[in-house]
Image (cartoon, grey):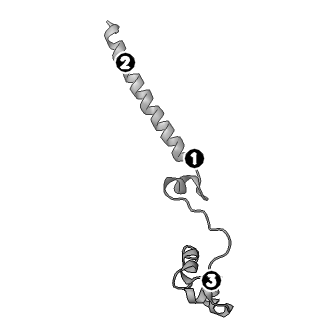
Amino acid sequence: MHPSLARRQLNGLVPPKIATPRLVSGNSGGGLDPLVDFYSKLPKGRAPSRFGGIKGRFFAGKNASAGPALAIIGGIFLIGYTLDYQMHLKHHKNNAH
Protein backbone atom coordinates (compact mmCIF):
# COMPACT_ATOMS: atom_id res chain seq x y z
CA MET A 1 0.00 0.00 0.00
CA HIS A 2 1.38 3.40 -0.96
CA PRO A 3 1.72 5.98 1.81
CA SER A 4 -0.32 8.57 -0.10
CA LEU A 5 -3.16 6.08 -0.57
CA ALA A 6 -3.20 5.27 3.15
CA ARG A 7 -3.17 8.97 4.01
CA ARG A 8 -6.08 9.65 1.65
CA GLN A 9 -8.16 6.77 3.02
CA LEU A 10 -7.55 7.71 6.65
CA ASN A 11 -7.93 11.46 6.12
CA GLY A 12 -11.42 11.78 7.63
CA LEU A 13 -11.06 8.92 10.09
CA VAL A 14 -7.88 9.65 12.03
CA PRO A 15 -6.44 13.01 13.11
CA PRO A 16 -3.51 13.90 10.79
CA LYS A 17 -0.83 14.39 13.47
CA ILE A 18 -1.38 10.90 14.86
CA ALA A 19 -1.77 8.82 11.69
CA THR A 20 1.34 9.42 9.65
CA PRO A 21 2.08 7.19 6.66
CA ARG A 22 5.15 5.80 8.47
CA LEU A 23 3.02 4.62 11.41
CA VAL A 24 0.15 3.26 9.32
CA SER A 25 2.14 1.43 6.64
CA GLY A 26 4.58 -0.24 9.06
CA ASN A 27 4.42 -4.01 9.53
CA SER A 28 4.53 -3.94 13.32
CA GLY A 29 1.67 -2.82 15.50
CA GLY A 30 4.00 -1.06 17.95
CA GLY A 31 3.93 2.20 16.00
CA LEU A 32 0.21 2.57 16.53
CA ASP A 33 0.50 3.17 20.27
CA PRO A 34 -0.17 6.94 20.00
CA LEU A 35 -3.25 6.20 17.91
CA VAL A 36 -4.56 3.60 20.34
CA ASP A 37 -3.84 5.93 23.27
CA PHE A 38 -5.74 8.76 21.56
CA TYR A 39 -8.83 6.66 20.86
CA SER A 40 -8.84 5.03 24.30
CA LYS A 41 -9.30 8.47 25.89
CA LEU A 42 -12.42 9.26 23.86
CA PRO A 43 -15.80 8.83 25.60
CA LYS A 44 -17.66 5.61 24.87
CA GLY A 45 -21.29 5.28 23.83
CA ARG A 46 -23.70 7.60 22.12
CA ALA A 47 -23.29 11.34 22.36
CA PRO A 48 -25.92 13.13 24.44
CA SER A 49 -28.54 14.83 22.31
CA ARG A 50 -28.49 18.60 22.51
CA PHE A 51 -31.22 20.94 21.44
CA GLY A 52 -30.61 24.60 20.99
CA GLY A 53 -32.76 27.65 20.75
CA ILE A 54 -36.46 27.62 21.52
CA LYS A 55 -36.79 23.85 21.17
CA GLY A 56 -34.08 23.20 23.74
CA ARG A 57 -35.39 25.81 26.15
CA PHE A 58 -39.09 24.93 26.18
CA PHE A 59 -39.78 21.55 24.55
CA ALA A 60 -36.86 19.28 25.54
CA GLY A 61 -35.27 18.30 28.82
CA LYS A 62 -36.59 18.47 32.35
CA ASN A 63 -38.23 21.89 31.90
CA ALA A 64 -40.35 20.81 28.93
CA SER A 65 -43.64 22.68 28.76
CA ALA A 66 -46.31 23.50 26.22
CA GLY A 67 -46.93 26.86 27.92
CA PRO A 68 -45.11 29.05 25.37
CA ALA A 69 -46.90 27.41 22.44
CA LEU A 70 -50.29 27.83 24.13
CA ALA A 71 -49.48 31.48 24.93
CA ILE A 72 -48.65 32.18 21.28
CA ILE A 73 -51.83 30.45 20.09
CA GLY A 74 -53.91 32.38 22.65
CA GLY A 75 -52.24 35.68 21.71
CA ILE A 76 -52.92 35.15 18.01
CA PHE A 77 -56.53 34.26 18.83
CA LEU A 78 -56.99 37.42 20.94
CA ILE A 79 -55.47 39.67 18.29
CA GLY A 80 -57.66 38.11 15.59
CA TYR A 81 -60.78 38.34 17.73
CA THR A 82 -60.07 42.00 18.53
CA LEU A 83 -59.58 42.87 14.86
CA ASP A 84 -62.73 40.99 13.88
CA TYR A 85 -64.77 42.70 16.59
CA GLN A 86 -63.51 46.16 15.60
CA MET A 87 -64.40 45.48 11.95
CA HIS A 88 -67.85 44.31 13.06
CA LEU A 89 -68.39 47.53 15.03
CA LYS A 90 -67.16 49.67 12.15
CA HIS A 91 -69.67 48.15 9.73
CA HIS A 92 -72.62 48.37 12.13
CA LYS A 93 -71.90 51.89 13.28
CA ASN A 94 -73.48 53.46 10.16
CA ASN A 95 -76.68 51.39 10.45
CA ALA A 96 -77.42 52.36 14.06
CA HIS A 97 -79.37 55.52 13.12
Q: Residue furthest front?
A: 2
Q: Residue 22 in the image: x percent, y percent?
A: 57, 89
| Numbered disc in front, either 3 or 2 | 3
Residue type indicated by callout 1: Ala
Classed neighbour count for the residue bearing mark 2: other residues with Cα under 10 Å, few (<14), some (14–19), many (≥20): few
Image quadrant containing the C terminus: top left
Residue type indicated by callout 3: Lys
Q: Which residue is at a point 39% across and 18% down the rendered structure image? A: 88
Q: Which residue is mark 3?
A: 41
Q: Residue 13 in the image: x percent, y percent?
A: 58, 75
Position above or below: 61 against 32: above
Q: Residue 7 in the image: x percent, y percent?
A: 55, 79
Determine whether, in the image, residue 68 is placed left or right of residue 89: right
How far apart are labels 1 and 2 at the CA level? 35 Å
Q: Which residue is mark 2?
A: 89
Classed neighbour count for the residue bearing mark 1: other residues with Cα under 10 Å, few (<14), some (14–19), many (≥20): few
Q: Residue 24 in the image: x percent, y percent?
A: 61, 85
Position above or below: 89 against 62: above
Mark closest to the chain's N terminus, 1 or 2: 1
Q: Which residue is at a point 43% across and 29% down the rendered structure image? A: 80
Mark closest to the chain's N terminus, 3 or 2: 3
